[in-house]
Amino acid sequence: MTLGGDGTILRAVQAITDKQIPILGVNLGGLGFLADTSPEKMINNLEAYLSENYFIENRIVLKCKIENDDQTYYALNDFVIDKSGFSRVIEIITHVDENLLNSYVADGLIISTPTGSTGYSLSAGGPILVPKTNVFIINPICPHSLTNRPVVINDNSQITLQVYTEYKEMNIYRDGQFVNNYPSGILINISKASFAIKLIKMKEMSFFETLRNKLHWGEDFRDKKRWSYNDK
């Protein structure tokens, strides 16, 4: 059980990785898409869990291998290629299953899971995906061309990136956490991990209800009673 916000769950994921330990997230933070148990419902939800009155949502995980780096990195939300604070754009040559997708000239690139679609990718103009969809989002950050839009691909795809920068280095982040900086020309391979992260959900919970509540959909500051159709 995590006590905090979504960031607390993301940090817990790095500790759990493939151990298949289910996570019940209690939201003490701000938005809380992942940690969607309120403190008021914590005891009830914990009792429901102990009574096996719950279900498990399996969330796909990204795996990242970087040239000349022996470590394997995992992310529940996203991997971000970033220009490292340099004022000029970088070039990210992107292949999907050995097919050239694009040579992005942009501030960076987000590779996101459906879970991460309501995070950084959403802020960068990406689509919202239902968690159970088996896809990834490739989303450029401030691309130099207006025709470069987010692309949704099958999550069985292999994504290969080669990053070029005029600066001495570029950065890679996973789930908002700094991984390391790397030189120009580095090769990055991203694919689906062999394991999923298990989130505990109560049976009355709904992703669409969470969307409406967290994003305040349907709320309007205007006085709609003044519109003529309300008189009919």
Image (cartoon, rainbow, N blue to C red):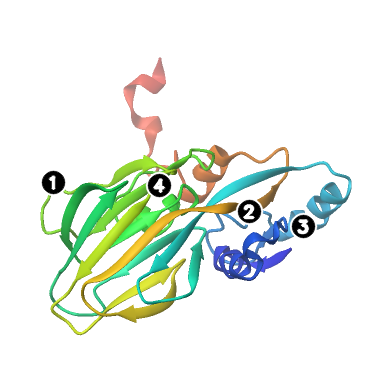
Sequence-wise, the earlier of marks 2 and 3 is: 2
Secondary structure at numbered mark 4: strand
Q: Specify few, some or many for label 3: CA neighbours under 10 Å numbering under 14, 14-19, or 20 or more.
A: some
Mark 3 and mark 4: Cα distance apart in space: 32 Å
Question: For mark 2, what is the residue?
Answer: 36
User: x, y percentage for residue 81?
Assistant: 31, 67
Type of the residue with mark 4: Phe
**Residue 151, placed above or below residue 124:** above
Type of the residue with mark 1: Thr
Say which of marks 1 and 3 sits in front.
Answer: 1
Mark 4 and mark 1: Cα distance apart in space: 19 Å
User: x, y percentage for residue 159?
Assistant: 34, 53
Can residue 49 be seen here? yes
Say which of marks 2 and 1 sits in front.
Answer: 1
Type of the residue with mark 3: Met
Sequence-wise, the earlier of marks 3 and 4 is: 3
Question: For mark 4, what is the residue?
Answer: 136
Type of the residue with mark 2: Asp
User: x, y percentage for residue 176?
Assistant: 44, 70
Mark 2 and mark 4: Cα distance apart in space: 23 Å
Q: Specify few, some or many for label 2: CA neighbours under 10 Å numbering under 14, 14-19, or 20 or more.
A: many
Sequence-wise, the earlier of marks 4 and 1 is: 4
Q: Quadrant of the N terminus?
A: bottom right
Question: For mark 1, what is the residue?
Answer: 147
Mark 2 and mark 3: Cα distance apart in space: 10 Å
Question: For mark 3, what is the residue?
Answer: 42
Q: Outermost residue toward the bottom?
A: 168
Q: Specify few, some or many for label 4: CA neighbours under 10 Å numbering under 14, 14-19, or 20 or more.
A: many
Secondary structure at numbered mark 3: helix
Sequence-wise, the earlier of marks 2 and 4 is: 2
